[in-house]
Image: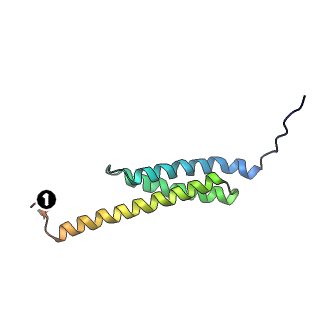
Amino acid sequence: MSETAKTPAKNGEEAAKPMATASLILGIVATATAILPIPYIGFLGFVGGIVGIVLAAKSRKIAKTSVGTAGLVLSIIGVAVTAVAIICVLACVGTLGAAGAFNGANWNITY
């Protein structure tokens, strides 16, 4: 009757697992929504990515796990891609507005 001896997990690793998992999920969602062409979904991914970065930083402060690192990386990528997309959209709208493509306050594009 041999029992497999499991090494007890450190208290820090057990406390960091939920935060690391949440940051990984939020990082995946932020990265996925950054490339979707659906209005306002990218903004939600941006906010979720920021929350994922905070959770990953807290979990890595307790214990450095690979899940926490992956969550941090994916959250940073999601926030960065969403920020670039928002800047591009604002630049396009500003350029069209400066060129006089919008007809008054109705936002009808005139050709």
Residue at left 58%, top 54%?
A: 70
Residue at left 56%, top 54%?
A: 71
On the image, the x and y values in percent for residue 84 come to 38, 64
Mark 1 closeness class: few <14, some 14–19, many ≥20 residues within 10 Å: few
Residue 98: image quadrant is bottom left
| Residue positioned most to the top | 1
Residue at left 84%, top 36%?
A: 4
Task: Residue under label 1, please give it.
Answer: 109
On the image, the x and y values in percent for residue 27 come to 51, 52
**Number of labelled discs?**
1
Identified by mark 1, the residue type is Ile
Q: Nearer the viewer, residue 104 or 88?
A: 88
Task: Identify the secondary structure beneath mark 1.
Answer: strand
> Is 98 situated left or right of 26 in this image?
left
> Image quadrant for the N terminus?
top right
On the image, the x and y values in percent for residue 26 come to 51, 50
> Image quadrant for the C terminus?
bottom left
Taking 8 as reference, is 95 above or below it? below
